[in-house]
Amino acid sequence: MSMRFISTRGQLPPASFEDVLFAGLAGDGGLYVPENWPAFDRDRLEELQSASYQDVAAEVLQPFIEGALDEGEFRTLIDGAYANFKHQAIAPLKQLGANDWLMELFHGPTLAFKDVALQLLGRLFQHFLEKRNQAITIVGATSGDTGSAAIVATAGLAHLRTVILHPRGRVSEVQRRQMTTVHARNIHNVAIEGSFDDCQALVKAMFNDQDFRERQNLAAINSINWCRIMAQVVYYVTAALALGGPWRRIAFSVPSGNFGDVYAGYVAARMGLPIDRLVVATNRNDILARFFASGSYEAGDVHPTMSPSMDIQVASNFERLLFDLVGRDSARLTKLMAAFAEERRFSLDPDGHARAREEFSAYRIDEEETLAVMADMVECTGEVVDPHTAVGIAAAQKARCETDSPLVTLATAHPAKFPDAVFRATGLKPALPTHLQDMMVREERFSVLPNDLTAVQAHIDQLPTES
Ligand SMILES: *Cc1c(COP(=O)(O)O)cnc(C)c1O
């Protein structure tokens, strides 16, 4: 039977996979989640212990796409999505210590874990648009890595036009060039005079403007799109299988910003993967760490750090977890989110907070600790890690006393994406993979706009429609 998806805000009828793919944000302002969690068939999982990443993806994602795509079509999309990865294992594990591991998620074309989901998402869009003979405009906000991954995943696709907003001057040069040097005619970059949260608010506002949304046939690639979360569930499963799952419990430490990646781990747990703990690793922008410590979700100011993809104070996917923490009571959730919109804070009841702490731990890692971990890693293991990954490793070290399980830190970006921070910490200059080196000399193309909804909408309205 086909899976149905419901909005966290509870104002919409259940939707199909295809609806959810194109809707991104639900029409009532909520986020889509599966109506029921599908359960892994443990015997099937066991059989997958020596299977390829693609085989595991097909098996794990089957319940979500059932009825929307046939198995063969879906398998073609999966194979296409992961053909561009530079490591056959797609998400290889490296041993760091006796019971500590690193899962490298940066072997895709833009060197960050966002490729894992977006390479598949671009192909899913294209598949359905070809069938419908329709075109869409993808709008997304990026704190650095989403934008380039979305751009590379959609460049040149006939039925898609992609507009990416980034906070001007707040992404690394490599991150910016990965976006602005892609010259396909369907790709448009906009630098906003503001923070990532401003960019994200603009995207949300565009989706909430019904006229604009319909006129442009908007679709979302941010992690508010369920299909991205879904694709990220797969590597939690491959890691667990490689380390003795599905029977052995595993813990994960996840460098977090918008709460999409670690939420995918939570989904894996809901589906029956034995996860011991999910460690939420944040930088100085610690709204999530403060929530798990106190039960109070309270936005602070955004501080630029060495790990810009986590410089986020409003973690959009957190609403999905919150929905479960309030017992899937949409009315209660809507009240909390309204309080947050008005006062920038709310407190969860003690029961809900306690439930959150049963599965999650959270740590805030400051800039000095991040630099120290990067230096230690080179010294103790020979590994050069990027600052986002370093935040994850530092949190894993703090969480080590909470679990005896194998602890896997997600390496979310390649060190060459953040050469300045890596140099500062280690004195080493990580080289870009050869296929990306010409990016540093190619012409950049982007527009600069104020943090103003009307200006951004007018800009998009006048972009050429043909691709
Ligand atoms: C996006 C990103 C993160 C944060 O992931 P979320 O899903 O937003 O929590 C961490 N590290 C890197 C390198 C990223 O690009």
Image: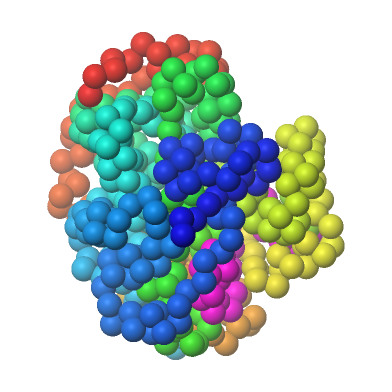
For residue 24, above or below residue 3: above
Does the image show residue 242?
Answer: no
For residue 284, above or below residue 252: above
- How does the figure colour the protein chain or chains? rainbow
Point 63% across, 34% down: residue: 28
Point 51% across, 76% down: residue: 273
Q: In the orientation shown, which residue stands out farthest toward the front? A: 1
Q: Could you tell me residue 216's position as x and y percent?
A: 41, 21
Does the image show residue 447?
Answer: yes
The image quarter containing residue 202 is top right
Q: Is residue 291 magenta?
A: yes
* Lateral position of residue 59 relative to residue 270, left or right: left
The image quarter containing residue 63 is bottom left
Q: Could you tell me residue 377's position as x and y percent?
A: 41, 72
- Number of numbered labels in the structure image: 0
Instruction: Tell me the quarter of the image containing the C terminus.
Output: top left
For residue 193, above or below residue 224: above
Q: Using the image as rendered, state which of residue 25 and residue 255 is in the foreground.
A: 25
Look at the image and give the residue range highlighted in magenta: 266-294
* Lateral position of residue 194 relative to residue 17, left or right: right
